[in-house]
Amino acid sequence: MRRFQKNTVAIALCGISLLVIAVSFTASRMLQANATSDELANVRITADGPLTVEAGGSIRLTAEGDYGTATMPVRADWSIGSGVPATVGRCRNAKQCTMTAGEEAGMVEVIADAEGYHSTVFIEVTETLKNPFTDALPDWATPSIIHLYRAGIIKGYDDNRYGPADPVTRGQVITLLYRMLRSADLIGMGKTGCNAYGDVLPGDYMEEAVCAFAAEGWGFDEENYLPNDAASRGIVARLVAIVGQPLFTEADLDVESLADGPQVFDDVPRGNAFFTEVAITNALGVMTGYPTGDFGIQDSINRASMAVILDRLLDQFHHAGMGQSPMHNVAPVQPGVAGSVSSSSEPKTAVFASSGNEAIPCHDSDGGENLFDQGIIYGTFHGQPDRAWEFEDECLSLSTVKEYSCDRGLYIGYSELQCPGASTCRNGGCIRIACEDSDSGQDFAVQGTVSVRNTDTGEVEFSSTDECVDYGRAVHQAEYYCGSDGRILNTGKVCPNGCADGVCLQASSAAAKAVSPSIASSMSSLSRSAAASASSRPASVASQHRQATGIIDLSNFFQGLNRVSKYYDFSMELYRRDQNDKPWDFRFSLQSGAGFGLGTSYLEAASREGSTALFAMPMKRYEELTEDDCKNNPDYASNHEAIIFGYNATVICFKTDDGVVGKMRGGPSDTDRVEFTIWK
């Protein structure tokens, strides 16, 4: 092609391009003119989240103009007004502006001027997250650890360490998940005494959590929970997936598609026992694996990682609008200024400028840190002596109140305080309560009701009635009573003859009654096989026999390095929490074996001091012993008050203060269980 032909083509193409640009520009101007044909009516300042930032942190703000028929970002000149130190950078004629807080906590006034309109918003600057523990925390987990610590979900050791790298046991995982759900009011209190697993005993720290999960139909279809084993990431994923089921709809998760979907992590192939749960927790953004592409399914999980998982899960519930808001996600009180536009829908506080230089006194209507009354405070913040504020005490969660008071009598301050005992927060104050029990305590022969009453209004806030609970393995009697702090506590026992009207049936009346209907919840979709098994069981009918058998589990004789004893009451067939929780018949303890030729330790059973409970050492085999053999054994005359398993005897007869006769047997000195049969 000749040169002049090439130039002609280039010129033509340039002309077409310029024409297209001109038409596009004209169309854009026409669209913009249509969109802004109405005059600007107002300007407001918005943010993506709560108007709060930590000291030294930043927050991104947007100026929005109201044109009557449309709202869109507008250019504004930004500046800092009154309040604690803060800065805005390069925010002249800008639609968005980043405010960076200084190191002092308090309020910052941010101003945006646009086309003659003036808008003000107040940003709360909170204290920088401070490590409450004596050991260092990893940066990636520090916010989560501190958030959960402030919410009372996690705790440190007695020496004030957190131990972020320490492994977490299976018992600790279920306890932490339970605390998290309780803090957000997403699960009911666990009814202890459920015996959901053979190795979770009455009085164990994780028992309430295990029973709460069992009542929801959550758990594993296994005999033992293995609470003292280190928790693997696979086990944690399974528990998180079970707990997170209410989020599936909100997150638009199709569990079946995830279960049949592609492999996500290199070490979790299709067919792996945890494949579905790992896919679910990853889709929820709660457990996302390692940068290497592995999930670490068999790796033990440490305390730092567990805090991050809990914090993410709690945040998911918060954003889904489920339960009480976590404390660190609750938007602070947003003060408004007369004539300005705030991003909050309705300002709760009023701000007044002081005329002159006179001091503005601080006044609190409820007299200070009064948790039980919603007070209104009026005064100034430190660093803002010429501007008065007004706040009301408010509830941050079901059990936490944001209580305002006068700091040193001069300035407004506040604390986040827990309501005492069973009291809950309502309308900015903790309710005054009294606990009442119709059967006056732990009376297993009567169906009682325990109520927590609001002493100001006289109304019953909540109550629990003794009931029959079917945990799948056995029917239990749940017995409620008042704790020393006004909380409703519960214990329970197995009903070998069935249960009706909240009371275990006795053998004499058992034949005439059927066990009350099961109230066991259906198992989760992740435990369908267990649910099918439970639902296929026929309703239990009370036995007519007076004989009962059972196992006393002694597998955990240590708490830390300290030996502990187990106290058992054969009359009620339940464990007692300690020696002062009477009545109990026999104490089982692990003693030093020095001098007995039994090695380092031996298992001893002993009667309670002052009781007439005794042991006998029969000559027959355990299977051959009858009620008469143990009831009339002449060896009781020897007044055996204690017995050593494997040394004095392996097979033992016994009788209790209140006439229960039975037999028991244990293994060698390292036994972890005692088998018994009783006749009542």
Image: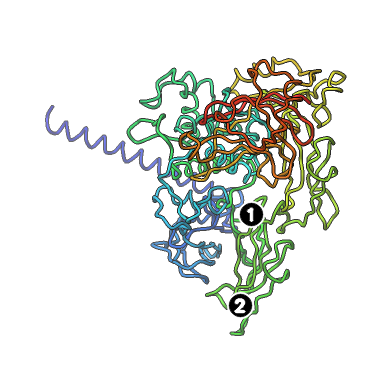
What is the x, y in percent for residue 618? 66, 23
Q: Residues within 10 Å of mark 2 (few under 14, many from 20)?
A: some
Residue sitting nearer the eye, 21 or 166: 166
Amino acid marked by disc 2: Leu
Residue drawn at (82%, 41%) of the image: 449
Residue sitting nearer the eye, 533 or 257: 533
Amino acid marked by disc 1: Leu
Q: CA distance from mark 1 to mark 2?
A: 25 Å
Q: Residues within 10 Å of mark 1 (few under 14, many from 20)?
A: many
For residue 607, side relative to residue 232 (left or right): right
Residue 487 against residue 625 in the figure, above or below: below
Examine the rendering and report whether any part of residue 405 can be seen: yes
Where residue 317 is drawn, which disc sits there? none
Name the residue carrying label 1.
Answer: 396
SS at badge 1: loop
Examine the rendering and report whether any part of residue 38 can be seen: no
What is the x, y in percent for residue 88? 43, 64
Residue drawn at (39%, 51%) of the image: 139
Where the N terminus falls, by quadrant?
A: top left
Residue sitting nearer the eye, 204 or 84: 204
SS at badge 2: loop
N-term mark: 1 or 2: 1
Residue 225 against residue 438 in the figure, above or below: above
What is the x, y in percent for residue 100? 43, 62
For residue 576, side relative to residue 70 (left or right): right
Name the residue carrying label 2.
Answer: 410
What is the x, y in percent for residue 97? 44, 58
